[in-house]
Image (cartoon, coloured by chain):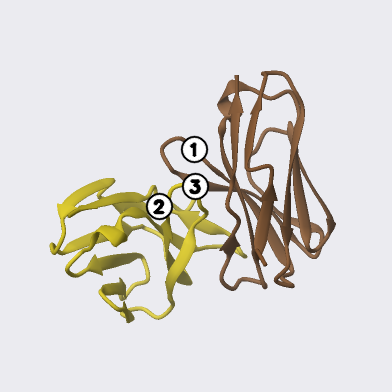
Amino acid sequence: DTAVSQTPKYLVTQMGNDKSIKCEQNLGHDTMYWYKQDSKKFLKIMFSYNNKELIINETVPNRFSPKSPDKAHLNLHINSLELGDSAVYFCASSQGSATQYFGPGTRLLVL
Amino acid sequence: TQLLEQSPQFLSIQEGENLTVYCNSSSVFSSLQWYRQEPGEGPVLLVTVVTGGEVKKLKRLTFQFGDARKDSSLHITAAQPGDTGLYLCAGAGNGNKLVFGAGTILRVKS
C-alpha cells in the first residue's frame, strides 16, 4: 500500500483553467503539507494542515486554496491557472513535527 | 526568514571518488534532515540530525550537524552509480515548517 498518494500524476492544462489535485495518506498522521518544486528543483512549502486546521500558509497567491475534508486527505484547488504555476507539487504528511513522508508528486504543465 | 544555502549545485564524479555536500545558514535549526530524490519520485528521508556536533553514518554516507546547529554536511565515500540523484538538506524551523536547500544534483559515472 502506498503511504502518501497523489492524483493525478500528470496534469496538462490551458492557462485560465481551474484544476484540483488530491492527496491521501494512510499512515494515520495528523499533519499534511503541500510543497511546490520549481524547474530548478527548489522545494518550498505552501500550506500545512494539522487535524484539518490550517497552520502554515506561506505567501501563496489566493488562487491556491487547500482543503482538508479529514486528516487523511488534503486537496489543492488552483483557480485561473498561470504559466508560472507549472511545477511539481508534492504532498507530504507527518505525525506532529516528526519525519515528513512525501508523495510521488503531481507534474503540472500550464500551456 | 530562515534560509539554507546548499553547495555545490551540481556534482559529476567517477565511481569510487569521495564527495561532500554542504548546507549552511545564519539561522539555528532544531534539527536538520537530508533527503534523496530520484527522477519522478518524491524526496525520501535519509537521516535526521538533532544535536550540535552529531555525526551519523549510513553505510558509505556520513552526516554531520555543526556545533552551533547552523550547518551540516553529507560525505559519501567511494561513490557508486546508484548514488546518483538529487540530495536535499532541510532545516526544521518554526512549528512543523521545513526550510529546504536548493539541492545538489549528483551524477556518478561508471
Front label number (2 vs 1): 1
Indicate left or right for B30 with B85 as reference.
right
Residue assigned mark 3: B40
Q: CA distance from mark 3 to mark 2?
A: 19 Å
Q: How many other residues sit within 10 Å of disc 1, few (<14), some (14-19) or many (≥20)?
A: some
Mark 3 is on which residue type?
Gly
Q: Colour of chain B?
A: yellow
The chain displayed brown equals A
Mark nearest the camera among 3 and 2 is 3
Helix, strand or loop status at disc 1: loop
Residue at 68% across, 33% down? A61
Amino acid type of the residue that numbered disc 2 sits on in the rendered structure: Gly
Chain of residue at mark 1:
A
Q: Residue at x 67, y 18 (%)?
A: A15
Would you call the spot at circle 2 few (<14 residues within 10 Å), some (14-19), or many (20 or more)?
many
Where is residue B72 drawn, in percent x and y?
Answer: 32, 66
Q: Which amino acid type is shown beneath numbered disc 1? A: Asp
Q: Nearer the viewer, residue A84 or A97?
A: A84
> What chain does badge 2 belong to?
B
Which residue matches tag 2? Answer: B101
Q: Compared to A110, does A39 lie above or below?
A: below
